[in-house]
Amino acid sequence: MKPLNGIRIVSVEQFGAAPYGSMFLADLGAQVIKIENVAIGGDPARYTGPHTLGKADSQYFQTWNSNKQSVTLDLRSAEGKQALLQLVETADAVVNNMRGDLPAKMGLDYATLSAVNPAIVCLHISAYGRDNERASWPGYDYLMQAESGLMDLTGEPSAPPSRLGAPSIIDHMTGITGAVGLLAALLGARASGKGCDVDTCLFDVALHQLGYSAIWSLNEKHTVTRQPRSSHFSLTPVQTFPTADGWIFIMCMTDKFWQALLTGIDARQLATDPRFVDVDARNAHRDELNAELDRVFREHGTNHWLSVLQGKLPIGPVLTVGQALANPFVAESGMISQVPHPARPDFRMLSNPLKIDGARLSQRVCASLGENSDAILAELNDRETSAS
């Protein structure tokens, strides 16, 4: 079952943020019509290497665009604008990730589009928002990590600030945030018959990821700083530890898990050590605790400690990307799908992390540039002819 079957979404999008969010909607069954600027050859992500998939396509592009259709239009031309309005008449939502000052100029906001479809929901994903002095500024994921403070919290204390390791994580979070707002607004529009504008932006979402570190700072002037070994700010031991042949991550978030750790590594004597008797003491004597635990964990390899401790407390190996994808549990859970591409019949992608009734959502690669233009535009013309 794909619960969004019957929903039509028109998306004027490129690169990461809006495409990631609209991909979730497409995977869930919505018909997502990706509008691509014919004058520049479509979404620039189609040409981003190093791994291409024939003409005007790449693995980078497919990362964010499964299950979508492609229509090429020049939205600056009269014909393109008219075709867009015809599409909007049949759509439930319109998405864009333009600079904040452009949607109104391009006629992609509710004030303009409600004239042809009062129930339309318009999702705007921009760098800094549409209603402030930065509306006209371009912006990308890594800039937001820098200015939000996220980079200052990432990396070792003695190293320079660092971006988060996951590619485009702020793009992804912004896309998902936008998709949640769009779906909520669609429910409202279905009930009232009146759509609206929905806004989110990369900067706001990046700042929101500060979570409790922001709350502590705002209310207590408590400044969190980079922690060694990716440690938690106030709970110990919650961090990486070296083994004889690699690294593991231990998360003793509760005293129950701390006791389970001591039993598992045969170090019950640490339970009565006054330096480690409770959460506050362990945090105050983190360096001394690290020295004790490092000595124990270095005695055996990662697989030994996993066999001893998994299931008793939260523990995991620190893997490379290749190792993570080759993990048998990933295959068992179905998180890698074979999604044939015309240029690569054996093409594989990460599965959508959602399941409906226990089943993964089916996937297909995004249509080639403009592949659906003739069929969809012909449908609109037939509809207009029938109406007249």
Image: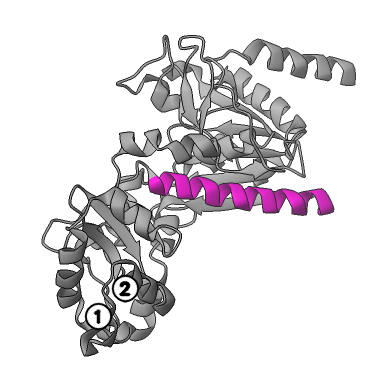
Rendered residue at 17%/51% (across/down): 244
Camera-nearest residue between 90 and 316? 316
Horizontally, is 250 left or right of 254 in the view?
A: left
Q: Secondary structure at mark 2?
A: helix
- Furthest-front residue in view? 266
Residue 262: give its label.
Answer: 2
Query: Can residue 116 be seen by looking at this rendering?
Result: yes
Q: According to the image, label 1 marks what residue?
A: 270
Percent x, y of residue 360:
62, 36
Image position of 95 with respect to 362: above or below: below
The front one of 116 and 88 is 88
Q: Are dots 1 and 2 in contact, CB under 8 Å?
A: yes
Amino acid marked by disc 2: Leu
Q: Is residue 248 magenta?
A: no
Please state the horizontal and vertical placement of residue 80, each as a whole percent of the image: 60, 21
**Element type where label 1 sits in the image:** helix
Q: Residue at x 17, y 59 (%)?
A: 156
Q: Is residue 301 left or right of residue 114?
A: left
Dot 2 alpha-carbon crowd within 10 angstroms: few under 14, some 14 to 19, many 20 or more:
some
Q: What is the CA distance from the residue labelled 1 to the residue labelled 2?
A: 7 Å
**Crowding near the residue tagged with mark 1, few <14, some 14–19, many ≥20 C-alpha atoms within 10 Å:** some
Instruction: Please give the label number shown on residue 349.
Output: none
Q: Position of residue 115 (x, y in %)?
A: 74, 40
Name the image quarter holding residue 283.
Answer: bottom left
Taking the view exactly as shown, the residue that stands out farthest to the bottom is 274
Q: Nearer the viewer, residue 336 or 66?
A: 336
The amino acid type of the residue labelled 1 equals Leu
Q: Which residues are magenta?
A: 169-192
| Residue at the image point whose x is 62% and y is 25% from the top | 81
- Residue 178 magenta-highlighted: yes
Q: What secondary structure is the stretch in magenta mostly built from?
A: helix
